[in-house]
Image (tube, coloured by chain):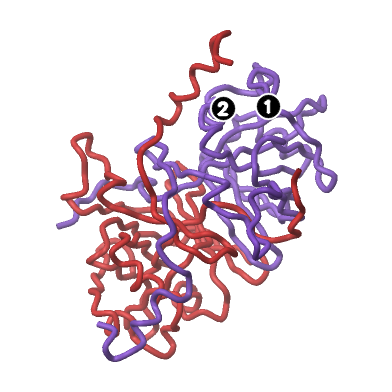
Chain colours: A purple, B red
Amino acid sequence: MKKSLGARTLIFPSPVWCIGTYDKNGAPNVATISWGGICCSKPPCVTISLRKATYTYGNIMERKAYTVSVPSEKYIKEADYFGLVSGKNVNKFETSGLTPTQSKLVDAPYIQEFPMILECKVIHILEIGLHTQFIGEILDAKIDESMIGEDGLPLMEKIQPYVHGAETLGYQRIGKYIGKTFSIGKELFTPSGR
Amino acid sequence: MKKSLGARTLIFPSPVWCIGTYDKNGAPNVATISWGGICCSKPPCVTISLRKATYTYGNIMERKAYTVSVPSEKYIKEADYFGLVSGKNVNKFETSGLTPTQSKLVDAPYIQEFPMILECKVIHILEIGLHTQFIGEILDAKIDESMIGEDGLPLMEKIQPYVHGAETLGYQRIGKYIGKTFSIGKELFTPSGR
């Protein structure tokens, strides 16, 4: 039996991504979000949603650029902190001790210590309600060299991203590999598949 | 040192969600996607992106509704299969043996056996490129009663969703709880936080 919990954002899982921007004075800011996802393959695009009240919202409206830095589990405290305080009141790079690196492709900084980075140019802005959605075209993906496998792709086991539970407000580890996409379901093709 | 991997959708993690729709003859269809995420809190909205070539794209354009059914790890093969074949050629509910249940709120079916469901009415459609983005307002979230905790919220440990690695094409388990959102970072407020 299923229970109705109402009109709520109760869906698993959500990502934990740190959004890097510059403010109008050129100071770097970072804010952690969970409302986002990839939204197109060609051009490669990632969407993030922000409330108008946030400092990051104003920065992106001004510069039309942002980066996404994916925290490893070892930076869970810093990433949570980046969602707790506003860049209006504090320089979060200074207080956390992490390093802002200026993107060469877009007008935004990323977090040097984090292992997985996207540099994005805003191509669409959509007012939805409490949140405004920004669609960013991905101009480059940068990965720590030590976390790239022999196939040239990032290794999730090394990057150690984690997930967020919307509304349940907890972080959970990403664990072991359980199957290959577009492959593990092939056995359902055969008559004996079920 | 970071390595540039180019303009690619290399960001972790992505969700694994099964999108339920009806076709023009009223036959239920389901397709698995990974391009999506929550995009607004009020009204609660979730976005998904689809290629125009997909059967689900045509169904949503016609009915302006979809459901999101979150597979548990035990249904990993079925969910992968739903991304491997098209509803143009096969009734995936029949071949998988899973049960389509008609939503009472929107013109779309969900997967009865899956533990976490959203019922969505399309409120925005945005052409991005290869993918079209649909923004669905969440009218209800339905959870298996046995997977709701004492606080009235779904338990990720029981629902057992899993994540997808964009471009790396692997599924990974969601593991143990590692911290509370808007809380674990509070120690960085104190001078001794670092």
Judge by depth and name the residue closer to the eye, A163 or B103: A163
Is residue A89 shown above or below B130? above
Judge by depth and name the residue closer to the eye, B90 or B139: B90
Q: Chain of mark 1?
A: A
Q: Which residue is mark 1?
A: A98
Which element type, helix, strand or loop, lies under badge 2?
Answer: helix
Q: Quadrant of the C terminus of chain A?
A: bottom left
Residue A26, position in %: x, y? 82, 28
Q: Amino acid at mark 2?
A: Glu
Q: Residue at x 42, y 50 (%)?
A: A175
Q: Amino acid at mark 1?
A: Leu
Q: Residue at x 48, y 43 (%)?
A: A162
Q: Chain of mark 2?
A: A
Same subunit under labels 1 and 2?
A: yes
Q: Which residue is mark 2?
A: A78
Is residue B60 shown above or below A56? below
Residue A151, position in %: x, y? 65, 65
